[in-house]
Image (spheres, rainbow, N blue to C red):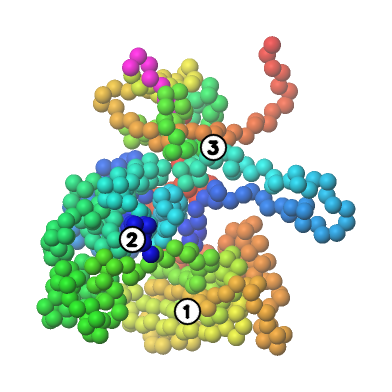
Amino acid sequence: MTTTLTPAPDQIALVDCVSFYANAERVFDPTLHDRPTLVLSNNDGCVVAACPLVKALDPEIMGKPWFKIRAWCQANDVQARSSNYELYGSLSSRVATILGRFSAWQEVYSIDESWLKLRGTPEELEPLGQEIRQAVLQLTGIPVRVAIGPTKTLAKVAALGIKKNPAFNGVLDLRRFPEEQLSRILDSLHVTDLWGVAGRNSKRLAALGIHTAKELRDADAKWLRKRFSVVMERTILELRGQKCIELETQPPTAKDQLIYSRSFSRKLTDPDEMHQVLSIYAQRVSARLRAQGSVAGVLSVWASTGWADEGTVPHSAHRSVPLLVPTDDPIALTKAACVILPDLFPTPGIRYARAGVVLTGLSAADGIQFLPVFQSEFDDRGIGDVLDEITRKLGPQSVGVGRGGLKTPPGWEMKRAMLSKRCTTHWDELPVAVA
Amino acid sequence: MQASQPEPLALDGPLILPLAPEAVACGFPSPAEGYWSGDLDLIKHLIRDPASTFVWKAAGHSMTGAGINDGDLLLVDRGINPAPGRIVVAIVDGDYTVKRLDVIQGRTVLVAENRDYADIVLHEHTEMSVWGVVTWILSRPTIRRGVRPLR
């Protein structure tokens, strides 16, 4: 290969949304524009997101339970919202779509982060980063940051720089720094500030004399791989600018696992209610399974008490059920989920706070053919399709299998008392403009 | 009851997926073969960019002259330049309003298209920003009998 024809190596850009949940709330609520805004977890439990204005008032706000900060919020004009995942999901997918227009290589990494591959000098890419910010802000109302570096790990370092220094105006290509300045920057970062370095490794690294990101970069990668893992070696090589963690740009055509898990609005102490919960969760996850045209090979089910709940005997149970024949049948899946029931309430004084059903070993529904002897008793009944058709017409609570079919409104459904309008997903909650 | 998972507004999906007549394997070949390339896709027709288009609802009567009636749905595109003359959703002092944007004698004005309503003339202290540009007004026709138009 001739060097003159070798194209400049691709750079990695991390585009992340600034205070995503809080800013998503602001898109359809101008009264939040310059007010401190925070978002609560499922069931309005504790703070999961807070904009910088809130963090300025209380740097330790994250994770605090709502009932403890309620009065404080009122006194300080802090606006609280229940988590509006419908809105966040909609805006997130719009942001990801727009980012995809700037690069042929995109990995949607989380609800508020995408990796992009970009090609060019820092003098070219920093203006492009500003263009990306401008486009996403204008089209969706969501502010983003664009952090660029030769590797994912270094792009994350650039992201830290942007957060620390407003002068970068939301965009930074780490290559703009000369070698020795970059070393100084890395020397100012603790190893645990780095992407991929777990906090639990901090002490062991310190014992080896490695405290800062620079010290880690300059350490013996092979030796540390032996003492830690291949992950540590990759981090070191990535800090040196050698790409080890590629973009996962192949979007999975179907999810390879499906999860339906929720916290209950009140704690459950009744085995019958737990039976109903698990039946409904199994049916909801099986509807998703059919929606993506898959069958599941394994069903896992779990239930647990609240981690901070002092009014319960702590307990959690977990069961995995291999399904003899991969299936999408709601009856089979409901039955499988209920195998956990005998494990629940082993002692008195237990109240469960959440439960979940997880389907794994997924494969395409039309991609498998079994000998009749292996066909489960549920196949060919088409019950799933019938259920889906009914719920599509009459709503998700119109019909169900087993306890999931009980008409009593489940008292344990999630509580979202301060939910803003689901403006982009619900016809009866559209934003209103006064004419 | 909550939707179990964020499901974005399906603006980019086609409305219907009829079978192509070419797929008929036997019998007389369809004379329409080669002419058929899919039915009209209303979503594509109405929406320039699904990522930047949102559905709003109009409430009130100040824009009846522009064809916006109380309760109409508005398609609002954030990706279109809010040039004077466009109908926009604007934020004025913390409230959303739909009006026609114009510049009259050097002043930005949000024009009401109904004589019973006053225009909003922007002063230095008014905070105004344009949220998006209205690209379509979706109204249902009224059902009424015995109507004779005035001549």
Element type where label 2 sits in the image: helix
Residue that label 3 marks:
B73
The tag earlier along the polypeptide, 1 or 2, is: 2
Q: In the shown orientation, is residue B40 left or right of residue A261? A: right
Q: Nearer the viewer, residue A194 or A216?
A: A216
Q: Nearer the viewer, residue A53 or B114?
A: A53
Rendered image quadrant of residue A116: bottom left
Q: Is residue B147 visible?
A: yes
Q: Nearer the viewer, residue B8 or A381?
A: B8
**Subunit of label 2:** A
Amino acid type at image mark 1: Val
Rendered image quadrant of residue A109: bottom left
Residue that label 1 marks:
A301
- B72 over A149 or under it: above or below: above
Q: Is residue A297 magenta?
A: no
Residue that label 2 marks:
A3
- In whole angstroms, how far apart are the C-alphas of marks 2 and 3? 59 Å
Numbered range of the magenta stretch: B99-106
Q: How many other residues sit within 10 Å of disc 1, few (<14), some (14-19) or many (≥20)? A: many
Q: What is the magenta segment's predominant secondary structure?
A: strand
Q: Residue at x 73, y 23 (%)?
A: B146
Amino acid type at image mark 2: Thr
Residue sitting farthest toward the top: B151
Q: How many marks?
A: 3
Q: Is residue B101 magenta?
A: yes
Q: Residue at x 88, y 53 (%)?
A: B28
